[in-house]
Structure formats: C-alpha cells, structure tokens
Image (cartoon, rainbow, N blue to C red):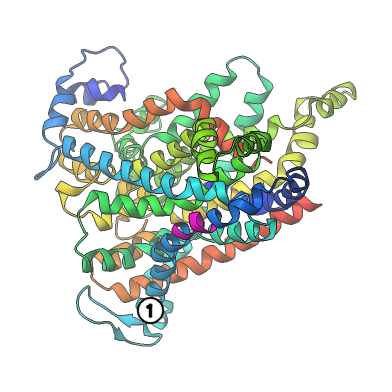
Amino acid sequence: MKLLSKSEQSAGSASLSRDRGSRKEKSKIGLDATNTKTAVFALLPVFLLLIIFLGLPIINSLQLSVSRWGGLGPLEPVGFDNYTHLLGDEQMRYSSRITIFYAFTVAFFVVAIGVLLASAVSASIRGHKAMKLIWFFPGIAPPTAVAIFWSSGFQPETGVINILLGKIGLGNTHAWLASSDTALYPVIFVGIWSAVGFAFLVILGAVEQIPISIREAAIVDGANAVQQFFRITLPLIRPVLLTIFTLEIIWTFNGFTVVWAMTNGGPADSTSILPILAYKEAFRYGRFGTAAAMAVITGIFLMIVGTIGIRLSRSEQQS
Amino acid sequence: MLFGTKGTSDIYAHPLALIYHPSWGNFASAWRVGGENATIGTWFFNTFLLVTTALVVSLVVAVPAAYFTIFLPPKINQRVMVGVLAGTVVPTILLVIPYFKAYNQIGMLNKPIAAGVAYGVLAIPTTFLLMNRFFLDFPREVLEAGLLDGLSNIRIFNRLVLPLSVGQIVSVGILTLIWAWGDSQIAIVLLQSQSAQPIAVGMLSFAADFTTNLGATFAGLSMAAIPPVILYIILSKYVTKGIALGGISK
C-alpha cells in the first residue's frame, strides 16, 4: 500500500522539476498565479492531519520510550532505563536477529521469484493478461485469510503440504508450526507467497519498458535466452530491483498481520518479530514504556535501511 | 477457497479431491456463528464502515491538495513531496501505542468509523503522491480552455479535472481499499471488543474457534477474501495502470 510513494523519491523528483519548468513557459495566462492561494488552502488539511496522526504520535512514542506507563495515569519518567534493559534482554536480541533474517530472506526470494516470473511472462505473448491477473491475486486476498489458510496447510497429517510430502514418501507428520526450531520457515514461506504478486507486477512493468530494439540487436548478435536475461534484462532493471528490494524489506520488517495470524509470535516467542514483540509487550503485559522503546528501535533500523536503499537506487539511476 | 464448500469430514478424508458433494451449509454456519458477541455479518459491516471512512478521508483530503499543488512553484512543490513522502515510511508499530492512548482518552476506542479515520489519514501520503504525479501530466490546454470560458479555479477542478480523473482515482482508491480491508495491526489495537472488529481481526478468533470445523473456517476465509478479489477483477485494468504510474518502473 505505501509502496509507490517511496519510489517517487528516487525517480520522481528529478523529472518533476524538469516537467514543470518546460510547462511553465507554455502557460502564460496565469493559471499558476491564480491557483496558488487555493493550493495553500487545499494543502492545509493534509499537513494538519499528517501532523496529528504521524508527527505527534512519533513524539509521543519517543516520550513513552523514556517513561514507565501501565496504560493508565500519568507517565513516570525513567530516563533510558527501557533502552538499557532492552539491550541486555535475550528475547529482544533474538527477536532483532529473526526480524532481520525474516525481512531479508522474504525480500530476497520475493525479488528473485518476481524477476523469474516477470521474464517468463514477458517472453510469452499469449496468456499475458491472465498471468498478470492470477499472480496478483495473493496480493489482494486479506493477509489474515491467507495466513490462516496456510497455517492449516502446514498442519501434520491433515495439512495440504504434509499430505503432498506423504504422497512422495517424505512423511506427513511434520509439525513445523508447533516447534520453535522450525516455526519461522512456514511463516517465511507465507510472507513470500503473499508479497510476490506485487513485486512481479512492478518488475514486469520495468522489463516491458526495455526497448525492443535492444533485444532485437542481441538476437541478431546470436544471444540465447539465458544470455539475454543476464546481459540485458538484469542490468537494465537493476535500479527497479533495488527499490523494490528495499521496499520489501521495510514492509516485511513491519509485517504484523501474517505472523500474528499464523503463530501469534509463538511457540515460545520463536517467531516474535519486533512488531509482534512490541505489541505483546504493550497490550498483553501492559508495559507500554518498553514497548515504545522497541518501536523506536524498529523505526531507527528501518530509517537506516530506507536511507541506504534510496541512496543506492539513486546512484544506480544516475550512473 | 474450494475448501469452503467441503464438509469437515471430507476435508480430513480427501483434502485434495476436487470432486465432492458441496455443502453450502458451511457458508451458512460460518455466517451465523462467528464469535461470542458477533457474527461474521457484524464484522463485514464494521469492515464496510472502516474502509468507506478511510476512502472518503483519504480521497477528499488528498485529491484536491494533489491537484492544486501542481500550480505551486516547482521548488515548493518538491518540498511538499518530500514532506509527504516522509509520512510513508513511518513504521506502524511506532504509531499504534500513541493511537491507543489518544483514542482511549477521547473515548473513541471500539468505533470502526474512528479507526477508519486513522486508516484514511495514513493513506493520504500515497494517495497524494500518486494523484500529484497524475495531475502533473494532465493536459494544460484543458485547464486553460476552462479559464478562457470564465470558470473559476474550483469549477475547473470540479467540472473538468475530476470527471477526467475517475480512472486514476479508482486505481488509487482500490489500493487503499485492499490495504484497509486486510490490515489488522491498527484495528487489533483500536477495535478490541469483538463486536467492533473488522473481518481481518475477527477472523483470528474465528479460526481458533473453528479448529474442529475446518470446512466452516475455510468458508469464512473465502467470504472475507471474495469482496476485494471481485472488486479487483472488475477494476484490474485501473490497478495495473495505477501501479505503472506509481513510477517504480520509471
């Protein structure tokens, strides 16, 4: 949902100013001047609402993160106690590790599968539209429904996956979701499954923008399909891949719904990624202060990932 | 989704068999039971309230703003873009605790419409950026013609620009709809009582109650998924275009 906006930053702003410059010369009868006042009025509610629903809550979270608060009454300032406590907390360290592992694994496979699908679909002309439609379906179905559906698929004996494994002689009693050692893998699988559709559509858009002449030249030069993929497609869509990889990391890192619906963070907090750990800390144990500190740490990490991602894709585009 | 019409015993006996006797009773029982204080019907109604509010808030606020911003000097326009952009990367977990605190203070917990306002505001940045992008490419000749005909700026927007932007508005709207329909992170905090929950949160308790009745669970899941999927099939033309316009590919 929050997707496209991000890319605007890397791709949009530069072309934007150019467009505006050339247009401005064309319109000489003062459309711009007469609309400026209206623009200020129209923007006012946007900024007010964003300040109320984004700015103030962030300040509030920062304040909560240096306080103790049980859900009622005034905040009790405790300095950086929440942070120092979290630094030494075994569960916090474990959760940070698996959150990073989860986000990077999902993002990597989403992009990889998205690229393969997109190049396969763009190569075949027939069924093109239907493929677009079908592959985006997992992206539309509500994540809760998808997650519950799949968690039943991973049940021993009765789940679709176990039955399939049983049929090919690998046993049908794997209780992945019941063991803290293995529960993360089904979650990763579903995370990938529900995110691939969107990445596929965006990557397909990029692949289709490669000029046909380049491809034809390669064919004349005798490049086969694999060479075309590695020498032409991949290098040309690299900036898009970087952007979508960054976005997928951010979304998966934030991804509460899939994990919560599949495991509630369990068994024994083995799948508690940071948003889930913070949610439980606040709304199950009533420790809002430490929960806010966890949220702030999550936010800082995402800012770092986002900045690196944007920098990288920007320099890619300029080069 | 086919599972929805299978009997529970059938699912356990032949989970992959496609030939079975459909029992639409599963849908009926899923519709009736739901949870302790709410049925799946209540959750649908709450989702409807939440999503509609989110759509109204995000579109009414962001679309006119996105349009009139194109007339600002490019430098200011760009600053506005950056400011709005910053709003899209804030992690939800950083917001939900303050939301809970504030909504609790003003007595707005467990009200789907109030939660819908939060969803609507969080959809404003994306709506704004996508629409702004679209309006920048809007043919200026049309606007100038309106001006020559003596229409005021607001009339130009209402009579000329809006009717010609329906496609893009639909495409941006459906992205908001899919997100607000499926998200549970904000709703689980702001709508804790079962009778106020949207379907995305309600289903969670639903699945736990129905472990013994897999058929009805799947019926419930498919009912939750059907409305956005149908909308998507009808409007897919717009959605694909909207994503292409989103500029990742440009």
Residue range in magenta is A40-45
Q: Quadrant of the C terminus of chain B?
A: top right
Kind of residue indicated by mark 1: Gln
- Name the residue tied to disc 1: A63
- The percent position of residue B103, horizontal first and vertical second, equals 25, 63
Frontmost residue, A63 versus A113: A63
**Camera-nearest residue between B148 and B170:** B148
- Where, by quadrant of the figure, is residue A98 drawn? bottom left
Label 1: state its secondary structure.
helix
Q: Residue sitting at 74 percent across and 44 percent down?
A: A23
| Residue A219 in picture, x, y percent from top left | 84, 22
**Side of A121 relative to A221 (left or right):** left
Chain letter of disc 1? A
Give x and y (percent) for residue A285.
23, 69
Residue sitting at 19 percent across and 75 percent down?
A72
The rendered magenta stretch, by its main secondary structure, is classed as helix
Residue at point 39%, 39% (across, down): B177
Give the x, y percent position of residue A82: 37, 80
Residue at the extreme front: B150
Quadrant the N terminus of chain B occupies: top left
Q: Is residue A196 left or right of residue A290?
A: right
